[in-house]
Amino acid sequence: MCALEQPRSHPEKPMVMVRNPQACTGCLICEMACSFHHIRGFSRNHSSVKVIKSIFEPDKVARITISYDKSSGNPICDLCVNENFRFCIRFCPENVFKLERIHG
Amino acid sequence: MKPHYGYAGNILRVDLTTSRFLKEPIDNYVPKFLGGRGLNQWILFKELRPWVTPFEPSNIICLGAGALVGTLVPGAARLNIDSKNALTAGIGSGNAGGWFGAEMKFAGYDTILLYGKAREPVYLWIENDKISLKSAATLSGKTTSETIKMIKEDLGEDDIQVLCIGPAGENIARPASVVVSGSRVVGRCGLGAIMGSKGIKAIAVKGTGIVQVKKPDEFMALTGKVSQRLRALQGAKARRQFGTLVGSPLYEDLSALPYKNYQDDYIPSENFAKISHEVFHNMYEVDRYSCIACPTACGHVYFIDRGPYSGTHCLKAEANSVWNFGGRLAIDDAGAILKAQEECCQLGLDIDNTASVIAWAIDSFQDGMLSKEDTDGLELDWGDHGVVLALLRKIAYREGFGNILAEGSLRASQIVGKGSEKYSFHMKGQDLIEGIRSMKGWALGVVVSARGGAHTRGALATETRRFSPEESEKMFGVETAGDAQAYIGKAEIVRYFEYVHSLLDSLGICFFTGNWTSPHGISPGELAEFYSLATGIEISESELMKTGERIHNVEKMFNVYHAGFTRKDDYPPRRLMEEPIKSGPLKGELLNQDDWDKMLDEYYALHGWDQYTSWPVKEKLEELGLSECIEILEQAHKIHLIR
């Protein structure tokens, strides 16, 4: 992306970040809540958040990714534009997500 | 096709004999039977004839994801499996959480029905519209976690959900279970053995579809509100930290943990201290997990890092693990309990039915009815976990003495004879595991349960959770919900929970997010709201409770039609009415015959069932919109024409 395309008035870009993946229990509430924002229905496939947690590998921390570009094929996180709150942050029972301002 | 809200919209019929598949819209069955258990049991009642035995190809297995599964209603994760009971010949029914039910709905199916019998071992692979039966030849004899791993490799898919049976199910051992998503188990009623008898090792599913709801924003607002409330509850916080193990002390405090096969209902306190929830938590816990859509996360993973079983991961331990292995078999080592639990999960054995038949064997051995010649040279004694583990394998593979144990305690005692029948504690033919002498409402719910024992129908948790008289009065119209020793009022509360649990099982919601253990759980009124908002089918609280009653009556009718159970089958084992509890806070308690009679009279009257036979009467079935069943029951001479 060309640097000029960055909105100059927002030098700090807010992003939903995965704060503590080790707390993730794999309930997939974030995926379903995210899909609700995108399609007003529930689906694991229409979510910007993807959680992979295997109970067979308890030593491994859950892998949680949030789509910020098109490469994954999932809808891109738009920070829940036009909603009253961010669904993943609001609904996650373990407070895994948080909003951060990223310099860039 | 019109869009479905709440529901995925389809029932999938799979004929294993001919490898044919049929998709049918769900509309013929809802909202009358809701989905999940209600729909499953209606199909069984309509399609299964009483002369079919459990392991025949003509038996049917119904797997139903509840109506609200696939949405964000807290705890909406449950998959109900129903079939003819391998132990009682009445209804066989159980459910489990995990992620499988939701995946089924995302793939487009509310219910899967399995008919017939495969010629060679197979597994069913469902990827949205694409359905196929694949060879399970290489999966034969594999443990449940091996099976899941191999299926994922075979399909080249990692993010799929699998339910499967272990060697126990393949060998048609009656205590065999169905293991869902690797760690959640549909244990009782021998459903794993029935899957084994049909030659189906597993079902794998991947769904990329959407579960729509009719009024999304209102639905989500209610979900958020209820979820917030549930997370703040004391019980939820405790289960989050310790899992359902945290419930055991509540039962210990009321002398309700059977010890050494009901020789007592209280685990000696020095033994209990070694297997308390804190021991499991502090010494062995390494991880937590949650079923889909559940804010509580009561799943805990343990790792045994010391002792003879060190190096073993255990994917779950429940209150039942302590009741069964710690109490019933008197194992006072948390590591050994975890090992036994994990072994059962891997072999596909139900911990309840399995521990119970082993308890029968130890008791009979100690009393001289069994000798080392009968037990393949094993010396059976209380608390000997090495022997218990050896027996688990023997049961799963039906080896030697295990071949007898694999029949369940009632049949095993009939094979052995010599008076060993008195050590078999069962309800309607299926093993009893609950301590029932001290808590009267819990006892009534367990004993009258249609599937044969088990506390997942009307059994109250209000006694262990000590509901206050005010809470009790408000919820049930009687004050005694929290008073364990009271017989009065308990029939009413059992009836209430029978209806509510019919609803929860049919909507696919966990009892722990419902109002079973806390008056602040999801109420029937909220269930009605959730259902109406999700499906667009407006239903009031009273209509929904009527639906719960209807589903409960269908289950009852199945038992009457298939097994002919009557009032005499609604009595606890004789010994629990004659021998009092020997120790603990409620020492001296037993179930009194006269009080039990009165409680049963009241219970049948509340249901509108006949007092002498316990069967539903014609007027009741008409009132519930089940007129078409009357003819079927009349032909079988199993209904009362005049009340």
Image (tube, helix red, strand yellow):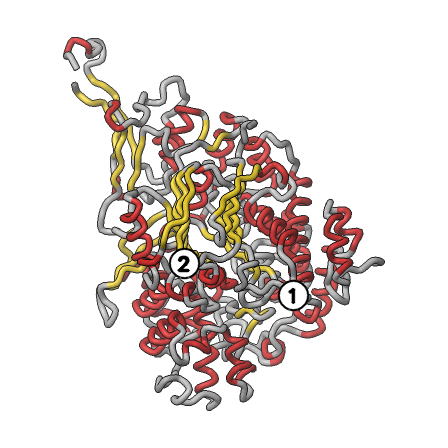
Residue B537: percent from left, percent from top: 62, 32
Indicate the quadrant containing the C terminus of chain B: top left, top right, bottom left or bottom right: bottom right
Check disc 1 and give the amino acid type.
Ala
Q: Nearer the viewer, residue B210 or B471?
A: B210
Above or below for B638 versus B47:
below
Residue appearing at x 32%, y 37% in the figure: A95
Q: Name the residue furthest right.
A: B642
The answer to whether marks 1 and 2 sit on the same chain is yes
Check disc 2 and give the amino acid type.
Glu
Residue appearing at x 67%, y 66% in the figure: B565
Mark 2 lies on a secondary structure that is loop
Disc marking residue B120:
2
Q: Nearer the viewer, residue B501 or B86?
A: B86
Sequence-first tag of 1 and 2: 2
Residue B124: percent from left, percent from top: 41, 49
- Is residue B247 visible in the rendered image? The answer is no
Q: Mark 2: few, some, or many residues within 10 Å (few <14, many ≥20)?
A: some
Q: Nearer the viewer, residue B630 or B440?
A: B630
Mark 1 lies on a secondary structure that is helix
> Would you name the residue on which mark 1 appears?
B563
Residue B295: percent from left, percent from top: 41, 42
Residue B189: percent from left, percent from top: 52, 63
Whole-Å distance between the Cαs marked 1 and 2? 31 Å
Tell how many labels.
2
